[in-house]
Image (cartoon, grey):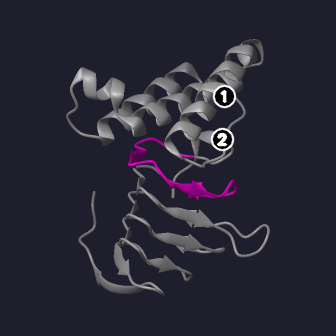
Amino acid sequence: MSRLVGDENTMTKSDYRNLIKQDERAYGELTIIEKVVHPGLKISRAYRRFKYYSSHRLMKPLGFIFRIQYHRLSVKYGFDVPSSVSFEGGLRIFHPNGIVINSGTRIGKNFTISGGGKIGIKKSGEYPVIGDNVTVGINATIIGSIQIGDGAVIGAGSVVVKDVPSHAIVCGNPARVIKFREEIT
């Protein structure tokens, strides 16, 4: 897994713009109207703005305003993800209602999550770590101090309580590997 942009104290304007572009590209071809009204894209933009402006001492008042905007969108769409979660570029959120991600979770680039997805802990201090190019299906649950490998797909309704190898497709309760997919470059 590559370095997380959120790990730095100060995000550059270039990093900020690149993250926004990566998030927009993750959705594929969207019209200008779709880019403005898509709930997942609205949330990711508000998250990126808040993180950028909060990381600069002189712009903290703007960061506070964008934090409020992020919070309002989170409440409106039922998206329960604290601002302390680290997302790399390429974040895709489909149907944000019911998505819950624990504050200590670390997530790689090109992450996709669908409605009802839950990522949490069993015991305090044991957070999941999710690699690059991971897709989490509708109502899937990931619990505990586990690693989700790069390119993994978590099927709809799955409950993941053990590590998932890279490029594995898992489903069920408890989730088990059903097959491996080709490596994405």
Quarter of the figure with the C terminus: bottom left
Q: Is residue 58 left or right of residue 159?
A: right
What label sits on residue 143 in the rendered view?
none
- Which secondary structure, mark 1? helix
> What is the x, y in percent for residue 132?
44, 57
Q: Residues within 10 Å of mark 2 (few under 14, many from 20)?
A: some
Q: Amino acid at mark 2?
A: Ser
Residue identifier under label 1: 67
How far separated are the C-alphas under marks 2 and 1? Answer: 8 Å
- Label 2 belongs to which residue? 83
- Residue 4: x and y in percent read 58, 46
Q: Are marks 2 and 1 in contact (CB under 8 Å)?
A: yes
What residue sits 66% from the left and 74% below the top? 145
Q: Which sits in the foreground, 110 or 12?
A: 110
Q: In x, y percent, where is residue 158?
A: 43, 77
Instruction: Tell me the amino acid under the disc marked 1.
Output: Arg
Q: Earlier in the sequence, mark 2 or mark 1?
A: 1
**Residue 98 position within the rendered picture, expressed as x and y whole percent measured from the top left:** 51, 55
Q: Residue at x 48, y 36 (%)?
A: 44
Q: Residue at x 69, y 44 (%)?
A: 84
Q: Residue at x 56, y 25 (%)?
A: 49
Q: Tell me where the magenta segment starts and ends, as one range.
A: 87-108
Front in this rendered view, residue 68 or 26? 68
To which quarter of the image does residue 50 belong? Answer: top right
